[in-house]
Amino acid sequence: MLQICNNNFETNVGRHVKVQGWVHAIRKMKENIFVDIMDGSTPKMLQLVIPKENKPDNLSFGSSIEAEGKLALGPNNRIELHTNNVIVVGTCDVMDGYPFAPRKQYHEDYVREFLHLRPRTKKFSSLLRLRDITSAGIENYLRSRNYINIHAPVLTSNDCEGAGELFLVQPNSKDLLKSMKREDLTEEESFFNTKAFLTVSRQLHLEAAARAFTKVYSFGPVFRAENCNSRLHLAEFYMLEAELAFINNIDNIMIEVESFIKYIIKDVFEKGASDVDAIGGCEIQWLNDKFTCMTYDDAINILQNNTSCLKSPVKSRTNLSKEHELFLVKHNNNVPIFVTDWPKEIKPFYMKECKDDASKVSAIDLLVPTVGELVGGSIREDNYEKLKSNLPLTSNLSWYLELRKYGNVPTGGFGLGFERFLQFIFNIPNIKDTLPFPRWPHNCSL
Ligand SMILES: NC(=O)C[C@H](N)C(=O)O
């Protein structure tokens, strides 16, 4: 079996091979039928040349086939398969509800209505391959720099960000809940003896692991119960989170983030070049520029001087709106910006106070074109007493506090939203088109 990605066809000319795939185009000529197939291993198609009399009756656009024959050099110097042995594995009756037709371009909103068939469309299959290449690039990069991958749990009893955007998890069986019920626990608590949620961030677990392995990361799904249906939000998304021990200066985190992002983009543009071409090319202007660094107060000043161009009000000591984030980046010639020194009251409990200003925390948001905030990171509060007084009253984070008691070290880290990263690298207008089966409010049907 030959996969189309094995593009050493040149050396294979004359060889007898078997291929498999899905039909993307059929052209009927006088003596032969020309069929383009894709097998998903590459954006490239392979042309089959089938003598008219050997074409199976049920061969159509969208059907899956197997073909055996001889590879030959075609008139345009492309390698094609000459075959009189084609088997239709699965038919596809285009008149019976198949939502796509040959040689037609569809808007992504339409294609998204058919999530189960979408991976077979040409552009989306390129996007999913690019997602795979980027994700492998991230793992390889971190491994090569001695980060240890920690499989932190999806189920957790903590609300890391303290923002209340949690999905509650409990058994679906009333009988099970009844059998596990205890007087002192609510029904929601009866399975784990505590409420359990889908994780919003693995940072707290990574902080525990960083105090044993120095450099750790986790790359997996996180969940946010936000009733937001924007082009930038998902209820389930992948987050890359990294945590480094023996770090007490946010500059180190910024250096780590900037070199990581630049490396991964260059790597995926190189390894995924044919898919990047297939989606119409991508260009990043600032790959050789240094990211800008400005304080939150500087950012607010810029916004306050430009209120006439902004719809959302600019208020100091509040979060930036998406409009503000995108304005700041544009104002900075579209070069990414690290915003530093955030007001303490708008950031989570785990961030460390700035040395020279106790009203600020040592945190960064990285703002980039197209999507705004891409990365959030901070130095973590490592002082036992200070952290104790910052902990939310209702939290059960005594274990997290205890990390500051035994063999404590300062740590810092960051989290990067993977889908936003893809959106921004490959210029994808809607985040729902960066992953195979997106979840967003009112949408979890398959
Ligand atoms: N690991 C991180 O620093 C990410 C951070 N906890 C967030 O969810 O934004």
Image: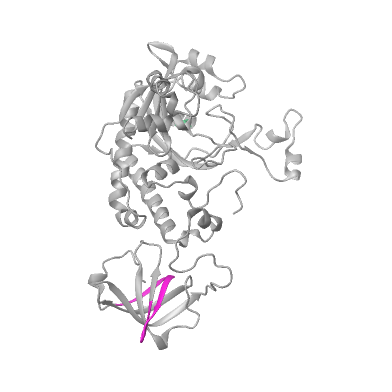
Between 353 and 398, the residue placed more toward the observer is: 353
Instruction: Establish if 113 lies above or below 174.
Output: below
Displayed quadrant of residue 14: bottom left
On whether residue 32 falls in the magenta region, the answer is yes
Which residue occupies 61% across, 37% down? 167
Which residue occupies 30% across, 54% down? 273
Q: Position of residue 94 (x, y in %)?
A: 53, 72
Instruction: Establish if 153 lies above or below 341.
Output: below
Left or right, 269 with reference to 232: left
What are the residue bounds of the magenta stretch? 16-34
On whether residue 222 falls in the magenta region, the answer is no
Between 312 and 258, the residue placed more toward the observer is: 312
Displayed quadrant of residue 287: top left
Instruction: Report the label total.
Output: 0
Regarding residue 408, the answer to whether it shows in the image is no
- State which quarter of the image contains the N terminus: bottom left
Regarding residue 223, the answer to whether it shows in the image is yes
Which residue occupies 27% across, 70% down? 9
Left or right, 442 with reference to 100: right
Between 252 and 365, the residue placed more toward the observer is: 365
Which residue occupies 56% across, 28% down? 163
Q: Position of residue 211 (x, y in %)?
A: 41, 27
Q: Main secondary structure of the magenta part?
A: strand
- State which quarter of the image contains the C terminus: bottom right
Displayed quadrant of residue 85: bottom left
Farthest residue toward the front?
Answer: 308
